[in-house]
Each structure stands twice: as structure tokens, then as C-alpha cells.
Image: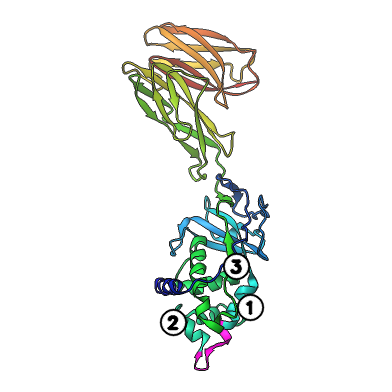
Amino acid sequence: MRKFLSILALLLSVQMAQAQCSTAVAGRLSGSMQPIGIADNGTVPAPVFTTNPSGLPNTEFLITNPDEDATDGGGAAIVYVDTDGTFPVMDLGLGSCGRFAVTPVSYDIHQIRRLVQAILNDNFNPAVTCCQLVDNFASGFCGALNAAGINDSTDINNISDFFTVVAAIAGPGSTISIGGAQATLDLLNGSLGLIGPCAGGVTEICFVADTTGQDRYMIMGPAANGLNINPANALIVGSSGTQQFTADFMPMGACPQPLSWSIVGSSANVSIDAITGLATATGYDTVQIAVISFQDTMLRDTATLIVRAQQVGVENINAASFQMRAQPNPFADVLQLNIDNKLSANTANVQIVDIAGKIVFSQIIQLQQGNHNYQLATNQIPNGFYTLRLISEEGQAVQKIIKQ
């Protein structure tokens, strides 16, 4: 292909074809940056245009794989073509969590038919066929078309045939991108005036596409049923430190999903980057870090971050020295905590957090040494699933609870 492009570049410097397709407008779809989840046995829905194509008679669809670069250096490889943009996902041959994008392209099939008819069946002069002429630029071009079942213009019927011609120009073993296809056709257009009757009277092959207006998809793997922050408890020593949080989906085979990080409630002393999960301290505080999936808002989790001037324990306190039990569980209007504390007396914050990471109950208690009971009035809490957290400067304890 490099030889072909080099020759065409030289031809282009000699003569440029006059553009006849400059007024054509490529159709645009949603252009959403977030991929839409689709089952591996599903069918891609019919594309909906936000901007309609105009200026060319044929509009069909190219499917590209953003995880595979084309050998032409023009971007993501085209892995599939389709006349109406609706097709079974399994036809792509991509596995779970594979991504693809659907892009509309507009062209004039009559132009490519006339060009192919001339190259395959006409003569440049009495001694040289058009196939022989074109073979100097794109070696094996006619043979590649014949092998693909294209012998004359009647075999050019849709976008698949159009790109069979483009692939034949690019050469065997090449994978094509939308950008590479456009570049190849631009160079081809620059040489059409030099091949005389072999161009079939065509002065330009029209082709327009707008990759900013795509429909993007992700093939969904096993459904995620859990989201876990790492670490579940963290400590920053000093008021200007940072802590990087990450999150794992369960099962581990679940597809990655965009996440949003935040501080539960608010804090003047701790902030977190909503995209990266990097927490930054500007003062001393104890906060809850929350993460939520954009794609499935039921997937969320919280973690505790302590900012202190000196090292303190942030792990769950060892059961040999600290035990907490909430009862009854499920509970109703009153929740009783039984705490056996073998550590020193200290102040603790009892929090009940809902599945959205919102603190629905908070109470300060004074932890005494020994075994003591503490009652929490929970009649104002709605029924549902919650996390009970007991947080002190020496650590925390956590228990899942149910209000009914």
C-alpha cells in the first residue's frame, strides 16, 4: 500500500481532480462518549440521526473496533459493514466487554460502479488493458476483486462491495480505518484524470463520514452485582496528604464502568477527584468516601478516610479487643448496640448509611471500657438495607443491618 500511496502522491502533484462532493454532509448519530451496554446475543437497534445526511444518494454504516488499530494508520479498524446499521452483535466476533462504534457514511454507488466496470473490462489503449495499467499502482487489484466475486458493475450493490474495492486498493493483508479509507480515496481521486478511459468518466469518488457522531456500544459480560472500594478504610497522616482510592466490580469478569467519586455530605478539609478517586486533605477530618457507577446507579460503596496529625488505627478493631453486635437484626424503631470494649474509653460516632452512601442516622456516644449496651432511636429511618458504622480515632467496626 505504501508504494501505491507514494505513486498516487506523485500523480496528485501533477494533477488534482476538481472536487464535486464538497457540498455533501455526513449524517451524525448521538455522538455520546459513554458506550451503551448491549447483550452479546442482542441486536444493535436502528440508528437514529441527529443530523441527516445530504448531498449523496447512499448512506450506510461502518462498524469500528476502538480496541484494534487498522494497519493503514488511520485509526480504529473497520470490523463490519451494514446497510441499515441493525445487526446481531454476535456477527462481530467480539467477546464480553468488547467495544464497537457505528458510524454512518455517505457515498455514490454509481461512481464506484462506473470506475470498477471500466477498470475490469476496458482498455487504456489497444495494447494495454485497464487492469494492467492499474496493476502498476495497486498490485493485484483486479485479481482481488475477482476473488471477492466482483467481475463487473452489477456486482457492486452496497457498502460491503464499496469497501471491498477500497481494501483491494490498500493491498492484501491490510486492515482499513475510516480515516485511512478517506485518505486512500482522496489520493485515488487525484489520479483519476490520468488513467483516461479506465476511470469510466468518473472524476471523483465521493465519500463522507463524521466519526464525532457515532453510536458507541459495549458488549456486556457477566452482570456486576457489587462494587467495592479499595481500601475500605484509609489514613492520611498530615493535613496536606493524598490517598488514592480504587474500586473493583464483582464478579471480576464484569465490564468496566465509568465511576463517580464524592465525599458523603461535605467537608471543608477533604476533597476527592470525581473521576480519578484521588482524595486530597487540607485539614484534619473523618469522612465517608462514596463511589457510584454511572451505568448502573445501584452499584455503589462507601469507605472511611481519616486525616490525623499522627498515626492511628483505621482497620476494623481486632475482635479479641473490640466486639460490636447490633440487635435485633432486622430491627424496627429501636436498635440496640452491644459493645465489648477492651480498649481505652473514647468518643465514637455511630452512623447508619443507606445504599446510596447517604448518612441517614448519626449519633455521638461515649465508649466505656467493658461490656455496655447503647440504644439508638431509629423510628425515623425508612425500611431498607443499611450499613452500621462505629467510627472512633482508634478504628471502626462495621455491620450490615436491615430496617423493616
Q: Residue 334 in the image: state x and y as whole percent.
A: 61, 11
Quadrant in which the C terminus appears: top right
Q: Which residues are magenta?
A: 119-128
Q: Residue 108 in the image: state x and y as whole percent.
A: 63, 69
Mark yes or no: residue 167 visible. no
How far is the residue under mark 2 from the one under mark 3? 27 Å
The residue that disc 2 covers is 136
The residue that disc 3 covers is 20
Q: Is residue 230 left or right of residue 300?
A: left
Disc 2 is placed on an element classified as loop
Q: Residues within 10 Å of mark 3 (few under 14, many from 20)?
A: few
Callouts 2 and 1 close, C-beta under 8 Å:
no
The residue that disc 1 covers is 155
* Residue type, mark 1 in image: Asp
Q: Residue at x 53, y 20 (%)?
A: 265
Comes first in the chain, label 2 or label 3: 3
* Residue type, mark 3 in image: Gln
Q: Residues within 10 Å of mark 1 (few under 14, many from 20)?
A: some
Q: Is residue 237 left or right of residue 222?
A: left
Q: Residue 156 in the image: state x and y as whole percent.
A: 63, 75
Of circles 2 and 3, the one toward us is 3
How far is the residue under mark 2 from the one under mark 1? 24 Å
Q: Residue at x 62, y 61 (%)?
A: 23
